[in-house]
Image: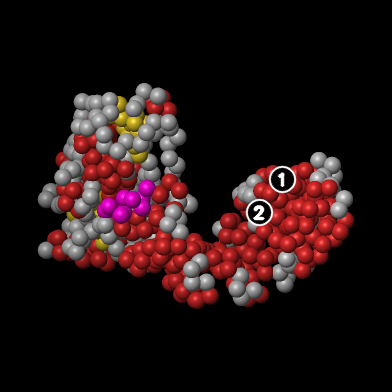
Amino acid sequence: MNQSALLEAARRHQSGDLRGALRFYIVARESSPNNPSILYGLGVLYAQLGEFQSGLDVVSVALASSQSTSLLILKASLLVSLDRHEEAISIFEALPRTTISDGDFTNFATALIASGRDFDALKLLSERADKLKGDPVFYFVRGKAYRSSGDFVSACADARFAISLSPRFLTAMVLHVSVLLDSREHDECLRLVTHYLDSFPNDVDLLLAKGNALRHLGREEEGASVYRQILSLEPENAEANYNLGYADLYLLNFEPGWRGYQYRWKAAGFPGSYLISDRPHWAGEHVDRLLVWGEQGIGDQVLFLRFLPAAASLVGTVTVSVAEKLLPLCRSSIQLPNVQFIGIGSEVDVLQHVDAQVPIADLGALFVKSQADIRSYPLQNLGPNIAREKFKVSHRPLIGICWRSGNRQLSAEKNILLEAFLKGLDVLEEATLVCFQGDLTEDERDRLLSIGPQFDVAFPDGDLWNDLKLQVSHLKSCDHVFSVSCTLAHLAGASRVPGSIIVPKSRGRFWYWARDPASQSVWYPSLKIYDNLCAARDGLKNLVN
């Protein structure tokens, strides 16, 4: 072994000359390629240089001749840095706790968090809490664990404390503002992220948090400006491209909007994944057999059904996959000779028989280049009207109502308490309220039945939650629909039923609820869009007058 080269490598390593140390470690290894001491030093050095795979390679060679605890811990920490968390956990869990250093303890916790074992991570960190009280990394990792477990208050407290111990702790700043976004504290997030950007003006994660805070506050154009700033630094950043596309679609900038929307499949938290297929993506060319596959929620699928006739006119046959609940309605309402519908999940059975495939939302990108284009593709006439006489009482108008969405992730933004919701209807002198709330509670039913002579209340028979064909038949019997943003709103708009739709002003306001200056929905001409209950009440009052 070249002892002098190894000593020089260690000296330079200790002094912080990492590149110089690397040269001498390599020289030392030439005469002793499998020496565990040299390979351990190289592994640590590669980790410090951020070359984690190289570090793992040399440590794996060393472990072939020595299963020392220090080598095993170094391998586990390198695996964490490579996002191979399950492998890292298996090594850490096999080692006595007392052999794991404080720094590697936090790596162990990081792997547990990434594997969804948040409470195990918190339990683990509690074992060293007393020893690590002054370590900002400890509070940062524990804050991540609290965030993953949904304890946003504790996560914020730990992120703040980590920053107080280390004022330029960038990843703790990112954690802090991310938790504020999670907890819907958008104003506070914007205030803090603006402050943190004074220290790190070009940090992409902080800029992304600022853009998202602005967008969730309804400040779409300001948010779009921040996303463009991110793209000037990282042109292929998926989150910035997707969020900018989302903002552009809301602002009716369709061509850049659709371009950015293509990044949805790469964006964190997007509800879905691209269909695995060797069939090419359809771009409007003639093919004999096309698969249009459903994505996202039922409302999104309803929105894009209007483009099926245009797509069908360009190809031989079209197979369309939609949510199972939507299947009977589509089959009975959309009668196109070369179109057949299947349920989502059945695409694998037809993929080998088609020439091209396309996600249903991409039909918008193909056919809508301007707001005028939307009017060129009329809505499909969904469902029959079979129920009006059942609910009609004298001359009273039929008002369909729904105050709660089935989207549990956005319940805080979308839903309205029944008592407040009913106040939005008090401008009506009289009406028959048709209740479309599929998850109606007994208390809510009793409250509706007690609202007095101003209103009659009708509860349609059948399972409206799952039978969308029945739901649409009742919807088309209504003179007006008064609802929060949900599947019912899409079905009302697609069925051309007049309606007042209350959408969140911030998070949960989807791009397709864009409206003109008169609050008219861009995508559903029969609907008016309002961002709070008071505005919807005033709109309903004007309609009555």
**SS state under label 2:** loop
Q: Residue at x 66, y 75 (%)?
A: 165
Q: Is residue 325 visible?
A: no
In x, y percent, where is residue 13?
A: 77, 63
Q: Residue at x 85, y 44 (%)?
A: 66
CB atoms of marks 1 and 2 within 8 Å: no
Disc 1 to disc 2, how far (Cα)? 10 Å
Q: Residue at x 27, y 60 (%)?
A: 251
Q: Residue at x 38, y 41 (%)?
A: 295
Which kind of residue does numbered mark 2 sit on? Glu
Which kind of residue does numbered mark 1 sit on? Asp
Quadrant that contains the C terminus: bottom left
User: Which portion, as a residue range, is magenta?
Assistant: 254-262
What residue did someone put label 1 on? 57
Q: Is residue 258 magenta?
A: yes
- Mark 1 vs 2, N-terminal side: 2
In x, y percent, where is residue 538?
A: 21, 66
Q: Identify whether 201 is placed above or below 350.
A: below
Instruction: Tell me which secondary structure the magenta stretch mostly adopts.
Output: helix
- Mark 2, Cα crowd under 10 Å, few <14 / some 14-19 / many 20+, is some
Q: Is residue 352 magenta?
A: no
